[in-house]
Amino acid sequence: MIHFRECIVLNASLFVSLIAGYTVLKKTGRKTDDRIKALLLLACISFVLLIFPVSASVIRIVFGTYYDVPDIWGIIPLIPLGGVCVSAMAGELFKDFSGEKKSTVILCSAFLAAAVLICGSLGTPEETMAGRSENASIGEAEVAQLICDRSRDSGSAYVVLANDDITAALHTLSADVVTLYGRDMWDGRLTKNRLGTYSQELRQLRDDLLKMEDNKFYLAPEVCREGFSFGADIVVVPGGCDPASFEAEGLYYEEFTASNGERFYLVYGGIL
Amino acid sequence: MAKTVLLILFLIIVAFFSGRTLMLFSALFTKKKADVFTSFCAGSLVILCVSFVSHLLTITRSGLIADEKSLAGIIMVVLMTASYFAFVVLTVVMGKAKDSVKVKRKPAGKTAVLIAGLAVIAVLIAVFTVTFGLWVNSTGDETLETVRVFVKGNVMYSIDPLTGSSYAEGVPMRYKILCLTGLYSVMSAAFGTSPEVIVHNIMPAFWFISGLCTMFALSGSLYKGKENEIFKRSVFMISVILFAYAADLSSYAQGFSVLSQMWTGTAVRIWVLIPFLLYLLFERKYITALLPVLCEAFICRTQYGIGFCACIYVLFVPCMFAVRRFKCLKAS
């Protein structure tokens, strides 16, 4: 549903701009600035280039890569185009309004209101947060900060194994910490699909960490052992894990409770 | 704090001074003076060019941040000195060739003044949002991590910023030559400002204001001296800001990165380079219009080698020709 709405947003902004541009041209005819006409023509040609599958085939043959429409959406300068069309249209409406032709004003105001509603995000702050799961929670950010502070104070770079959000947060806070894996450099997201960057064992380790997020806490001691074998100094596990399992394995651990009540265990592999 | 203020002043002075000189030089050929807003935007592109030159030289030689800092400093001093003399000379030359016809403006009506007031409020709210990082979203971006690693280790592209250990695989040259991370690292190292403040606050505000100046100049190019000028220019500014806010729903929408990731090359391209390119094309400054095309290659991957600015440049010129030709045919 979110993807469908993304498509609506992308197309709606162009559609409204073109409608506004058409309205301007229809009303003013030859009097419209040639530069606005040229910009509209450019947008139409670019749109045609984007939409036709032939263009995609040509680019694939010439450059050897497949392109996705949203990747090269930028050849249509939407924001300046939208600004030009809306302001030109508004200027004509202002003239009409001054001449008491209110029906045109009402119709085009309705267009603008529809555009804003279709674009939608002005009124949906919850939905704008969807998909941004890499942002660490308050508790995760506090754990990351604690580890960074300790690493800085000790003077040596701790090697940490933690979930995706804590891993990402660590590197935004400090360059003093090393993690066993990180977000893929090319697309910036931590992906399971990235073949060849990390070993199969490391990717399995990350999968087990994800399972612990699904309350499979019995995996914690095994994850810690594996993490230490990879060279980790600290492994961060959820607070739902049973501390007795760490004691049974002879692991030293510390409980951390964040300001929002989130609990974590920091399991140490030999450092204080 | 004092050094951060110094950094901000440095950016403003360099951008304005060098941009003004560039636009005055361009005006020698087109006989059309550029205003303050255009000069500021042009200056931000000059900063990009200087940054690219120093970054490229450093990458191909030592890779040390200290070296890039020195190189950038030297180039900046030379540039500012040359700009000062050029500025003085060109101001004298252009001052002699003043506009002979002054456009008489009608006083603005109440509605136009009201809309202009709304535009100012919209601009201030948007600048506030960007400057204080209220909508920052670093999903898919690693500029901050990269800058931290560069500044800490004083060397570029030897440590993977996402793990803290050495790169398992090499970094392609096409990524290494992108100069924004080098520019931010040099600023952080030279002025002692935290990388987070530079990446999430200062530079987004700088680029955003530069883009606003460009948008204002673009509106001036279309509507200056025409009927309902103030009303149209104000509506233009309000609508571009609205488009930026409305694009927040999807990372694919143009404008998403404007409020959320204004420090990135893609955001600078959408908000600064493309509108500035359009402004230059509208003003028929076809040689100067190559500057945004070049700058795009300096700051972001040009998408399969195409380059959005290059595409727009290549498409606009024939479109303009076609429109004028059609107009002549219809008239005859």
Image: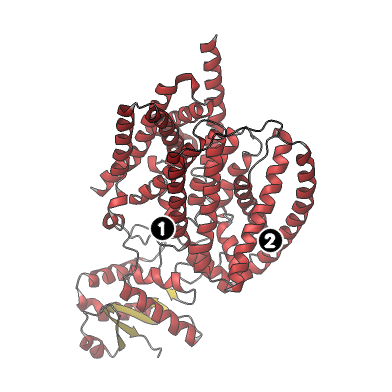
- Check disc 2 and report its element: helix, strand or loop: helix
Q: Quadrant of the C terminus of chain B?
A: top right
On the image, the x and y values in percent for residue B297 come to: 57, 47
Q: Which color scheme did the rendering employ for the protein?
A: secondary structure
Q: Is residue A16 above or below residue B204?
A: above
- Contact between marks 2 and 1 (CB within 8 A): the answer is no
> Which residue is painted at 57% across and 28% down in the image?
B317
Mark 2 or 1: in front is 2
Left or right, B45 with respect to B315, comes to right
Q: CA distance from mark 2 to mark 1?
A: 29 Å
**Callout 1 amino acid:** Gly
Local crowd size for mark 2, using a 10 Å CA cut-off: few (<14), some (14–19), many (≥20): many
Q: Using the image as rendered, state which of residue A241 and residue B280 is in the foreground.
A: B280
Is residue A102 visible from the viewing direction of this image? yes
A121 relative to B185, above or below = above
Which kind of residue does numbered mark 2 sit on?
Ala
Q: Circle 1 sits on which residue?
A: B140
Residue A244, horizontal then vertical, whole percent: 21, 88
Name the disc covering residue B72, or none. Answer: 2
Quadrant in which residue A17 is drawn: top left
Quarter of the view holding residue A25: top left
In the rendered image, which quarter contains the N terminus of chain B? bottom right
In this rendered view, identify the residue nearer to me: B161 or B232: B232
Q: Nearer the viewer, residue B16 or A50?
A: B16
Residue B171 visible: no
User: Which residue is drawn at the image coordinates 48% and 46% (left, top)?
Assistant: B270
Q: Residue at x 28, y 51 (%)?
A: A123
